[in-house]
Image (cartoon, rainbow, N blue to C red):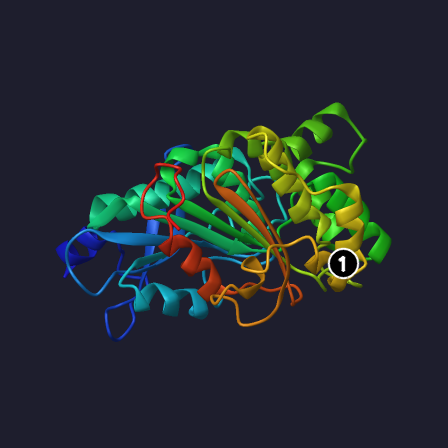
Amino acid sequence: MKRLLQKLGLRKRDKVSATAARYTIRVQSTVDRHRQPCLFIPAKNGGPQPLLVYLHPWRHRYDFDSTPWQVEAAKRNWHFLAPDFRGPNRRPQACASRLARQDVLDAVDWACANHEVDENRIYLGGCSGGGHMALIMAGEAPDRWAAVSAWCSITDLAAFHAECRAMDAKAYRHVEKVAGGAPGSSAEVDRELRYRSPVFHMDKAAGLPVDIAHGIHDGQPRGIGVQHSVWAFNALAKSVNGPAISDEELELILARNTLDLADRTDPTDRSDPSYDRPIYFRRSAGASRLTIFDGGHEDLPHAACAWFDRHPDTSGTENT
């Protein structure tokens, strides 16, 4: 039994489900030797299979209920991995720190070393704080992922801090704990905020298929404003000389002017069968795209995995 646990990367006190299909593993950081817990669900069939890496939201950990994503992975016979990457974003070690970034990569390396993973089909997704980290990792290690899907993401921490203060949402305190102070309080704090904000690093993911999606009702009055996803997409578009979202179009999105938005979107994009609700606006730039859909602060795992299905390798060429 001890040898089996070692082979799986487990310890006796780690939990294994009754069906032996779900494992809580401990992956040691290659930076500081911290052992992070991760949820791993192996594909049922043998042979190299794709790996879906799910990143938890802002306030949560690896054991956040990711059942809908797990279901989509199981339908496709994919491995499923949910790293912890230092847990909730309330301390400097979390929230896209050097340690947290390496935790994600170390977890993926563990999966590839211990299971038959098709390394040309490693997919990355998440919502809210998980979307924030997915976009960070898109820029951090673009060659590691076949495609990325980020939902309702925070992309500029300084702007998010100001928005939370305006809404009296306590997440602004989390930002201060992560960065060591409020935006503008010191050059070091501002450097930390920039380092941990995806919008400043999207150019590094220029050739990677990145799916950015946001519910049009998010951020009204609470949540994450749709502008964060627009900012990230525009940074990607700029890096590939693609069509960005204009200030006028962003105002239409924020005003939820769905009629005028529809006029600016190809009808074929508004009838995407992978979405179970209306799409109000979509634009592509290079291998990436932005989708504004009828929803709030939420993700649609089926649509995310449909995007992954379209990208079977890391060539950067979209398969339509």
The answer to whether residue 283 is above or below residue 208 is below
Closer to the camera in the image, 51 or 294:
294
Closer to the camera in the image, 213 or 278:
278
Where is residue 225? Give x, y as percent: 73, 54
Q: Residue at x 45, y 66 (%)?
A: 302
Q: Say which element carries label 1.
A: helix
Closer to the camera in the image, 292 or 64:
292
Furthest residue toward right: 166
* Left or right: where 187 falls relative to 75: right
Looking at the image, can residue 183 be seen?
yes
Looking at the image, can residue 197 be seen?
no
Where is residue 7? Give x, y as percent: 18, 52
* Left or right: where 107 falls relative to 227: left
The answer to whether residue 148 is above or below residue 236 is below
Q: Mark 1, residues whose alpha carbon is within 10 Å: few (<14), some, or many (≥20)?
A: some
The answer to whether residue 268 is above or below residue 172 is below
* Left or right: where 312 falls relative to 300: left
Q: Residue at x 24, y 47 (%)?
A: 118
Disc 1 residue type? Asp
* Left or right: where 286 falls relative to 43: right
Q: Residue at x 76, y 58 (%)?
A: 260
